[in-house]
Amino acid sequence: MNNAQITAKGDAYVMNTYKRIPLAFEKGQGSWLWDADGKKYLDFLSGLAVNCLGYAHPVMVKAISEQAAKIMHTSNLYWIKQQVEIAQILVEQSGLGKAFFCNSGAEANESAIKLARKYAKAKMGQDKYEVITFSNSFHGRTLATVSATGQTKYQKGFEPLPTGFKFAEFNDLEDLRSKVTDKTCAVMLEPIQGEGGINAALPEFLKGVKELCNEKGLLLIFDEVQCGIGRTGKMFAYQNYGIQPDILTLAKSLAGGFPIGAMIASDQVAAGFVPGDHASTFGGNHLACSTALAVINYILDNNLMDHVLEMGKYLRTKFDGLKDKYSFIREVRGMGLMIGIQVEADGNRILEECMKEGLIINCVGGNVLRLLPTFIITKEEANLAVGILDKVLAKM
């Protein structure tokens, strides 16, 4: 089937939950994709920050095929060696205590919210349940995580929403302080907001949040579903700030494209969960954790985060050059290979024109171009992407 045929059949049989681009990709290699019509694209989105090692990476292919031939799933009624091994790596890399595994970022955030409430009620009192999140945040699509998301457009039509969430202005410490009450148990935030437009927390803000949590006895939760696992040039984005959370959530790049999520907490906070409090049938099974092990070990063994930093700086320089060239580019922002270009133009039109030229990017909020290339991107590929974007912007 070609793109048009797949699109037509999808319209007939698949629920309409995405505003899909009428393309279907059939093959990938490195940072490149081919659609059902045979057209080739340079991928600067990497499956929404998921395919960190690109496509058909040999270490992932080997890990998946070898594990699938042995055993894929047994459930968490039993110990899973690969889960124990990836838990050890994540705990040691984060400086936290214990890990829980699930299947997605939303599930990871759901488990973080549950753990924060369970721990707070046991240690701080039964009236401790409120979680403060921030404007322009995004924490998932379950009822609890969409309620925690600071963007009303994702919540419309799902009322009544679960209660217990309050919102403060991102990067505004005084506004956060004003929202804390005697019911507050935790503060939850993305060190770098992804869906909100690639907004990085200011160092002084994040330092103030940590100090406020310490002062008030609140748990600090970092949602690193999108910005974690090396995308900023550090294993975790918060390591760029020198601040430690109590709870950390991960997904997306964790297994380079295989579905997995993780929630990590300090030993003290992790003790808030006992058997029966939370679970995930598929979470952290043999196949998912074998893939995650292959991805994380490859990142660490090959100093891939140094490459992320190098290419991030290189691309920022190139995009800053485009900003000097085009007056409608308001700002270039981000960290590592998580880059946002804010434009006073129709971002969706830019996306469409880039697609025609063979470059895959994304647009959030209508005017922020979101660029999330693979960790294996080369300078030649970076130059090609910048050239295509330059050509498209010249038409605006």
Image (spheres, rainbow, N blue to C red):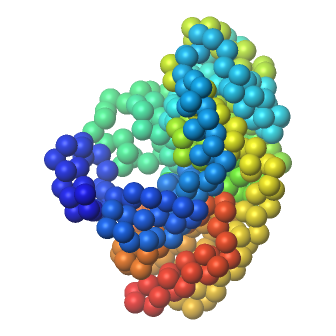
Above-or-below relation of 160 to 382: above
Residue 211 appears in which quarter of the rendering? top right
357 vs 65, left or right, is: left
The answer, for residue 148, to whether it is visible in the render is no
Q: Residue at x 81, y 39 (%)?
A: 93
Q: Residue at x 44, y 58 (%)?
A: 27
181 vs 304, left or right, is: left
Question: Quadrant location of the C terminus?
Answer: bottom left
The answer, for residue 260, to whether it is visible in the render is yes
Above-or-below relation of 61 to 369: above
Tell which residue pokes out farthest to the top in this image: 275
Residue 5 appears in which quarter of the rendering? bottom left
Q: Position of residue 57 (x, y in %)?
A: 61, 53
Q: Position of residue 320 (x, y in %)?
A: 64, 81
Q: Residue at x 74, y 49 (%)?
A: 298
Above-or-below relation of 234 to 80: below
Instruction: Count numbered badges in the picture.
Output: 0
Q: Position of residue 311 (x, y in %)?
A: 71, 70
Above-or-below relation of 174 to 5: above
341 or 7, nearer to the observer: 7
